[in-house]
């Protein structure tokens, strides 16, 4: 394992069973943090935690549907009790989209499904984490938004674009209000990353196209970099894209 720069810190990761969340958990564990993995797929979470432990890391599992505000509060309470009220890093990576994503086929159910995970879930976890961070006068929130949070790509659709723009706005309000309490927030906005969410597209990209995208480990390294910045440094917004950026090349 590499240098343990985050030893003693506790990191709670949502959407940790795969993709960016899993890569972030792995990277933070490599840096020495105790990582708490949350998501809906229990078996995948357990496998991820076991793999982190096999590499010498410290990992716990807390199954969670982030759209359930009461479940979020109960999960946070268990984490805080186990770790003496400590929560240093919150990585909000749970996210989803729907194949029926355009005005011609988006339904209220699809809208609520996307907004419930991408925005409400992020709000619930942040709301419950901030008091613990305030008490220690230290904390970092990393919210995974998207290229669709700073641009308006057509292919990601109405609900996804709306939710990810809202995530960017919400993230900066944390810095506005909580910077005086030693709390920092970063909005991470990646363009295409080769993760399972791509399978929800009306036309999923090919294996060759995915190989040219950002890979989850690229985001893991980025997340670790943000977390390792000294406490006086706040990286408000990170936009990262593949060099072969299909948003430009194919005008997606």
Image (tube, rainbow, N blue to C red):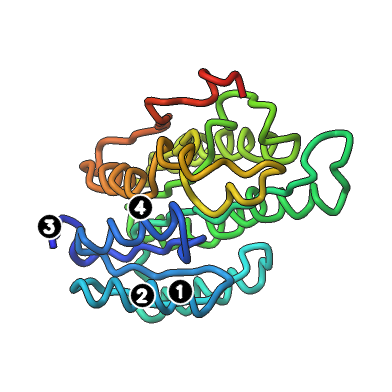
Going from the N terminus, do you reach mark 3 or mark 4 first? 3
In the structure shown, which secondary structural element does the residue marked by tag 1 occupy? helix
- As measured in the structure, the alpha-carbon distance from the residue carrying label 1 to the one carrying label 4 is 24 Å
- Badge 4 is on which residue? 139
- As measured in the structure, the alpha-carbon distance from the residue carrying label 3 to the one carrying label 4 is 23 Å
Give the residue furthest to the left: 3
**Within-10-Å neighbours for mark 1: few <14, some 14–19, many 20+:** many
Say which of 225 and 190 sits in front: 190
Indicate which disc residue 2 carries: 3
- As measured in the structure, the alpha-carbon distance from the residue carrying label 1 to the one carrying label 3 is 23 Å
Judge whether 176 appears above or below 60 on screen: above
Task: Assess whether mark 2 and mark 1 are in contact (beta carbons under 8 angstroms).
Answer: yes
| Residue occupying the point 30% across, 74% down | 51
| Residue occupying the point 66% across, 66% down | 69
Q: Is residue 92 left or right of residue 242?
A: right
- Badge 1 is on which residue? 45
Q: Indicate which label's residue lies in the foreground, 1 or 4.
A: 1
Going from the N terminus, do you reach mark 1 or mark 4 first? 1
**Within-10-Å neighbours for mark 2: few <14, some 14–19, many 20+:** many
| Residue occupying the point 62% across, 69% down | 65
Task: Assess whether mark 4 and mark 3 are in contact (beta carbons under 8 angstroms).
Answer: no
């Amino acid at each position: 394992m590499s240098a343990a720069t985050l030893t003693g810190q506790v990191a709670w990761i949502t959407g940790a069973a795969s993709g960016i969340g899993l890569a972030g958990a792995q990277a933070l564990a490599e840096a020495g943090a105790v990582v708490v993995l949350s998501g809906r797929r229990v078996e995948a979470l357990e496998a991820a935690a076991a793999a982190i432990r096999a590499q010498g890391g410290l990992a716990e599992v807390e199954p969670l549907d982030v759209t359930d505000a009461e479940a979020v509060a109960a999960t946070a309470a268990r984490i805080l009790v186990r770790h003496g009220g400590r929560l240093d890093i919150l990585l909000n990576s749970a996210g989803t989209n729907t194949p029926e994503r355009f005005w011609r086929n988006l339904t209220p159910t699809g809208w609520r499904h996307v907004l419930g995970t991408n925005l409400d879930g992020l709000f619930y976890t942040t709301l419950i984490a901030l008091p613990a961070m305030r008490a220690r006068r230290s904390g970092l929130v990393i919210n995974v938004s998207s290229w669709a949070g700073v641009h308006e790509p057509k292919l990601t659709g109405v609900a996804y674009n709306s939710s990810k723009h809202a995530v960017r706005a919400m993230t900066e309000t944390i810095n506005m209000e909580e910077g005086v309490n030693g709390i920092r927030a970063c909005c991470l906005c990646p363009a295409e990353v080769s993760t399972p969410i791509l399978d929800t597209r009306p036309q999923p990209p090919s294996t060759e196209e995915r190989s040219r995208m950002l890979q989850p480990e690229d985001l893991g390294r980025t997340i670790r970099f943000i977390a390792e910045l000294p406490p006086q440094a706040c990286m408000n917004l990170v936009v990262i894209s593949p060099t072969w950026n299909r948003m430009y090349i194919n005008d997606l």
